[in-house]
Every structure is written in structure tokens, then in C-alpha cells.
Image (cartoon, helix red, strand yellow):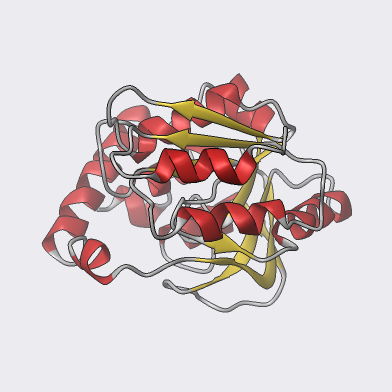
Amino acid sequence: MVVPAYNQHKFINSCLTSLLHQTLTDFEVIVVDDCSTDDTSEQIAALIKDDDRFKVITHERNRGVSAARNSGMAAAKGQYLCFVDGDDWVEPNFLAYFLEAYQAAPAAQMVVCGHFGYLAVPSPAKTYDQKELVSNINFGTVGGFSWNKCFIRSIITSHHLTFNEDIDFLEDQLFAFRYADYVQSAEYVPEKTYHYRWRFRSNLAHIGIPFFAARRKMIKILKQESKRTLSEDLNNQ
């Protein structure tokens, strides 16, 4: 798991505590402190001091969430990779459900979980082919979030996939589209195991014109990369 954190005084405790209490015990967590100016780093150190499954990377300057995720990905060594934002938290079976889904569907190249708190689109358990996956990353159950997905790390490393550090909105959806280019089968697990913390002011700033401007920029990037995952809907925008 990769946990980007910047000035999470109020929330980092609940986030990391939820990871410490996972029912699955064989995992690693890379916490990336993106040059916090509050007591986030002290809280992180106190919470994980007795657990060698946790590693901390500290940025010398604030570089943004995409850079933090990229730093965490570069340091990760596990077979699978998922992301938990520093102000969110997860259920104890968050990791266990991901692993069970991969074991039940060995051909899957992505697993998506249900979640609480933000643009949740209910659906029963489902297997997506690539076309359906792209459509649902665009608008649907899968969504463009990074935090409701479990990726296969070898796909990320072999194709040199990273988060675009030049954009600060929809960067996770862009990453999801890029990853989907290499996915033939993905599993959706409807159990809600991720809690997204809705922070009104920060999320409100991305509604309306900023959203559509960021979306146009994301689509332009994808078209320039000539990704075959682009559906007709995306190509026509």
C-alpha cells in the first residue's frame, strides 16, 4: 500500500490505525510524508514505530499527491499495489477482500472494491472486460479513483506507469485509464471496505468549470498517447 500524506494532523491516526488492524497480516505500507508542516510526521513515527511492515519516505519539499504516490510506487516491493489517502480509512478486511478476489479469478489484472462517501455507484459483483472497464472508469461503478482499486505491480513497473505530476486534478483517473490499457479482465467486489472522507471545501473547488477543464486536459493527454483503451465516447470529446 502507498499512503500519501500532507498536513494530515486530524486524520493520519485513523488512517494508519485502520491499516495496522488489517485481518491480512502479510503486507507492506509505504507512507510518503510530502513535507508536512504540522505534526503529521511525528504522528506517523509514533504509530508505526514497532511495525517493520511500514516504511516512511519524506519529501524535502511539497511536491503534490502525484509525486508522493510515485515515490511510494518506486519503493514498493509487493505483488499487488493499492493506495490509501492519508485522510481516509479502511475496513479491517480491505486487503483480504482484494486478495480473495485475485485468488478466485487468477486472470484478473485489477480488482475494484465498494466504498463509502463519494460518488459510489452500487453494483453487484461483476467481471469487466477491457471495454466495460474503460466505460466504468469514465463514468460508473469503477470510477477514476486510485483508492478503490488493487493493481498488479508488475504491470505498473513493466509499462513504466506513473501519476502525471503536471496535473493536480483527475490525475488518478488518468492513471486508471493508462493502467486499463493493459487489462483484459477486472473484478468488482461490492463489499464496501474503503471510507472516503468528504472534505467539503477541497472537493467543492473541483466542481464545475475546474472539473471540465481538467477533464479536457486529461483527454488530450490520452489522445496524444494514442491509448487503445479510449472508447468512442472519449474520442469524441
Q: From what the image shows, is residue 27 above or below residue 22? A: above
**Residue 147, image x, y percentages:** 52, 53
Q: Find residue 78 and report its image quarter.
A: top right
**Which image quarter is the N terminus in?**
top right
| Horizontal side, residue 206 vs residue 26: left or right | left
Residue 21 drawn above or below residue 80: below
What residue sits 44% from the left and 38% below the top?
A: 41
190 left or right of 35 in image: right
Between 57 and 110, the one lying in front of the other is 57
Instruction: Estimate the x, y position of residue 87 in percent, counting from the top left.
Output: 43, 57
Residue sitting at x 39%, y 60%: 10
| Side of 86 relative to 16 (left or right) | left
In the orientation shown, which residue stands out farthest toward the left?
A: 209
Near-viewer residue (126 or 235): 126
Q: Is residue 36 above or below residue 225?
A: below
Query: On the picture, is 183 further left or further right than 5?
Result: right
* Residue in the picture at 21% in, 58% down: 211
Would you identify the image quadrant in which residue 61 lies?
top left
Front residue of 214/32: it is 32
Residue 99 image position (x, y, % from top left): 80, 51
> Which residue: 46% across, 74% down?
117
x, y percent for residue 103: 87, 50
Q: In the rendered image, is residue 163 in sight?
A: no
Kindly tell me whether residue 33 is visible in this rendering.
yes
In the depicted view, which residue is nearer to us: 207 or 53? 53
